[in-house]
Image: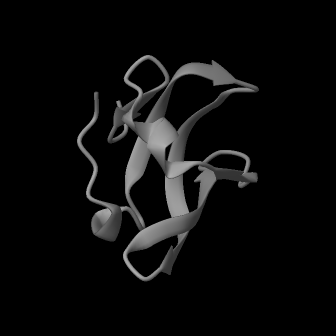
């Protein structure tokens, strides 16, 4: 399980374990908070610039995501 501090999530880099459409590397572009809780998180693919809204807890799953660009 990846350790994530929600306050340091913005601009963090992630690698998809199972890339789709040649999208392997991602950057967190938007994080919205309500008090101390993350309400919304967006990632952007580096190659295609496609953005997607995800649940930030998904990034903790090591079977889907690795921290950094590897």
Q: Where is residue 18? Give x, y as percent.
A: 57, 17
User: Residue at point 28% right, 27% down?
Assistant: 1
x%, y% of residue 45? 63, 47
Q: Is residue 68 left or right of residue 10?
A: left
How many numbered dots are placed on residues in this image? 0
Q: How far across and how far down the image is residue 53, in percent?
A: 69, 54
Q: Residue at x 75, y 52 (%)?
A: 50
Quarter of the C terminus within the rendering: top left
Residue at 53% of width from left, 46% of height from top? 26
Query: In the figure, is residue 60 to the left or right of 33?
Result: left
> 44 or 38, which is in the foreground?
38
For the point 38% across and 36% down, which residue is it? 60
The colour scheme of the drawn protein is: one colour
Side of 66 where 15 appears, left or right: right
In the rendered view, tell whether residue 55 sits above or below residue 18. Answer: below
Residue 29 coordinates in the image, percent (x, y): 55, 66
Task: Decide which of 64, 36 is in the foreground and name it.
Answer: 36
Residue 8, quarter of the rendered image: bottom left
Looking at the picture, tell me which residue is in the foreground, 22 or 52: 52
Q: Residue furthest bottom?
A: 35
Left or right, 53 with reference to 43:
right
């Amino acid at each position: 399980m990846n350790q994530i501090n929600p306050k340091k999530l913005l601009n963090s880099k992630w690698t998809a374990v199972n890339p789709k459409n040649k999208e392997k590397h991602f950057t967190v572009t938007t994080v919205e908070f309500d008090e101390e809780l993350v309400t919304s998180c967006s990632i952007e693919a580096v190659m295609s610039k496609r953005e997607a809204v995800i649940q930030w807890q998904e990034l903790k799953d090591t079977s889907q995501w690795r921290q950094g660009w590897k």
